[in-house]
Image (cartoon, helix red, strand yellow):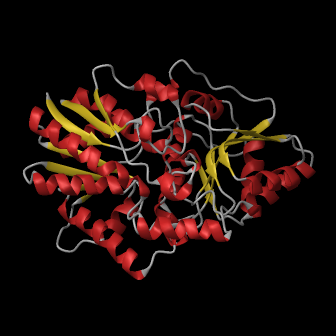
Amino acid sequence: MKKVLIITYYWPPSGGAGVQRWLKFAKYLPQFGWEPVVVTVDPEYAAYPAIDHSLEKEIPGILSVHRTRATDWFRFYAGDKSKIPSGGFATNRDDSLKGKLTRFIRGNFFIPDPRRGWNRHAFKKACEIINNEGIEHVITTSPPHSTQLIGLKLKKKFPEIRWIADLRDPWTDIYYYDLFYPTFLSRNIDRSFEKAVLRNADIVTTVGPTLARHLESKLTGMPGKIKVIHNGYDESDFGNLTASTPERFTISYTGTLSGSYPVDGFLEAVKALIAEGHSISLIFTGHISEELKVRFISETGAGNPEFNSYSDHRTVIKQMLSSSLQLLVLAKDPQNGSFLPGKLFEYIASGRPVLCLGPTDGDTADILDKGGYGKCFDYYDKKGIYDFITALMKGKVSAGNIPPAYFSRKNLAEKIAKLLE
């Protein structure tokens, strides 16, 4: 069995979709002839946005995981690293003078990101493993995009290795990039890093077709380098769990929801339905901004919205299976047509219909529409949202079809195995 070195900052006990992507692929790659070897950061030195110890149970016992130290650059400018979200400052935006100054420091003195403090430690360990075990295939996954610079340095030192750079999100075009106030010089430095990674990697993988086209537009004379590997779902996550029908029509949301996410049309539609006497429960699990909590309570009635802090993965799956409808909100941005959140595929796998707020012509809308898993509406389309929820409550619309095997983590791992060949 051939070995592949996977370099990822996010790994259990860190929680979130980015962790699950390569945890699941590492689980299934051995079935297709590849033995993963993982290099990640030691949790004692990491800056994780969320912790989920339950994911540690999913690490295959035979998997070799090497954890290294990291320089904690977050401590130098942000204080409590435990409060740093995965998007830097995308969800906990602080517009005070101190908050703006902190973001400026982040955007201009820590390029591409503060987690770059892990790079020299990870590079040293990766070189050691490559030399000792004769590894010829390397995968780097981001964000944090600083991880891709490890792959770039390895490719320079070992030009014979086959390097796959996996970009789960845009790099210099991410929707919150300008919140860091990058100067002209800082932006150009970051773009040069991005371009070097895209050009020097043997293959670049990403999560959806629109983002793939966007990344490909940054390359000239290199057609076919960008490949799509969706996030998908793991069928085993739903094993021994059964769906249940709640007494009240229950709409649930899991993940991060900041005050900058427009939810106006949804709130107005739900408020109208409640005013008509419909019994509706709202459940939010994850990082929800205080601003939105106040809005939801004031609009839907005190005691109705239930807010849960970040929960372990299995608890979240149970919530999906006991919902009537699942809410998905995409950040409002000119590039949000490319957004394909990891939780979308687990929403789909639960068999419960999905109501998405976002571009009606984007990648997420395309998957929902074509598969009959739900529907995407403009953020302010109160009538469309109202009609959709009403039709679901009356059983007049069918949504929540069983997902195709194409989106299973196992089948997607097979695609990765073929790319490695």
What residue appears at the point 65 percent right and 32 percent down from the top-left corner?
Answer: 319
Q: How many marks?
A: 0
Name the quarter where the N terminus is drawn. Answer: top left
Q: Nearer the viewer, residue 365 or 256?
A: 256
Which quadrant would the C terminus be assigned to in this image? top left
Q: Residue at x 65, y 71 (%)?
A: 97
**Where in the figure is residue 58, as x and y percent of width and height?**
42, 25
Q: Quick check: can you spot residue 225?
A: yes
Relative image position of residue 195 (x, y in whole percent): 27, 69
- Residue 232 visible in rendering: no
242 or 31, which is in the foreground?
31
Q: Answer with the quarter of the image where residue 21 lies.
A: top left
Name of the residue lying farthest toward the bottom: 184
**In the image as oriented, which residue stretches furthest toward the front?**
76
Where residue 13 appears, x then y in whole percent? 47, 32
Residue 178, above or below 304 = below
Q: Decide: is 364 above or below 351.
A: below
Name the side, left or right, on which 131 lies relative to 366: left
Residue 111 falls left or right of residue 161: right
**402 lies left or right of 414:** right
x%, y% of residue 360?
57, 64
The residue shown at (32%, 19%) is 61
Residue sitting at 20 percent across and 46 percent down?
A: 419
Image-based side of 32 in relation to 272, left or right: left
Asked if 61 appears above or below 226 in the picture, the reply is above
Q: Quadrant of residue 149?
A: bottom left
Q: Is residue 62 above or below residue 35?
A: above
